[in-house]
Image (tube, rainbow, N blue to C red):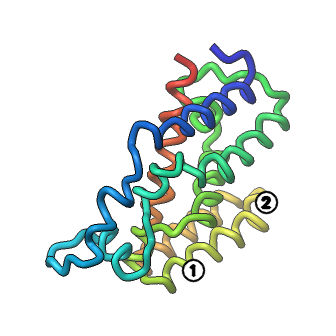
Amino acid sequence: MPETELERLDRVSRLLSFIPAVSGDLVAQDLKDMEEDDAPGLSAGEQLYKEHSIGGIREEVSLGFPTITRYGMNLLESFAYSRGNSLSLSCGGILAEDRKLALDYLMTLLTQIKDTTLIKRGGFRGLEYARSTAISYLRRESRSSSWEEALQRINLDFVSRNLSPGGAADLLAVTHLALSLVVL
């Protein structure tokens, strides 16, 4: 069992680095053969790969979740340092204990990925809009006492534009699961 939160985060990063050995290259396995296949009924992710070479979640898995290990872990490590690096004993770790941190983590992931759910719903303009909104929130509102109201406004705005950061939410869930596994 890890003794500090930073040790737990390091173990999560190492755990995620083993995923490609288990999954293999999902992009090559699932998507490469589609380049010549004009069969109807492709999923949104398959269509985005075919048209724009965006690997989506398959690429994240195949590469060991680089968005989590490069960007998400930096945020969590900074938070752990700021609170004295004490180990969180809850199953989901610091993300489960701190709602604001979990939401800031989601917004951080959103700034970094090509979220195929966002692209499907809002096109590349929707993706860029969501990214710029997340960046603006992280630079300004996340540091203010009105962060929660800002996120509520963003949520209503995204709903009105039919935008859903489903890919970023999936990565948040993967992180929560990995944090839960490491404490066991």
- Residue 106 percent location from the top left of the image: 58, 55
Residue drawn at x 56%, y 65% as measured from the top left: 113
Question: Residue at label 1?
Answer: 128
Mark drawn on residue 89: none
Q: Which dot, 1 or 2, sits closer to the camera? A: 1
Tell which of 6 and 136 is nearer to you. 6
Question: Residue at label 2?
Answer: 144
Tell which of 95 and 23 is nearer to you. 23
Q: Vertical placement of 39 versus 10: above or below?
A: below
Ranked by sequence position, the earlier of labels 1 and 2 is 1
Residue drawn at x 65%, y 66% as measured from the top left: 150
Cα separation, mark 1 vs mark 2, equals 24 Å
Residue drawn at x 46%, y 51% as measured from the top left: 62
Which kind of residue does numbered mark 1 sit on?
Answer: Glu
Q: Vertical placement of 32 versus 183: above or below?
A: below
Quadrant in which the N terminus is drawn = top right
Q: Is 12 positioned to the left or the right of 127 in the image? A: right
* Mark 2 neighbour class, 10 Å CA radius: few under 14, some 14 to 19, many 20 or more: few
Which kind of residue does numbered mark 2 sit on?
Answer: Ser
- Residue 99 percent location from the top left of the image: 61, 43
Q: Vertical placement of 183 versus 9: above or below?
A: above
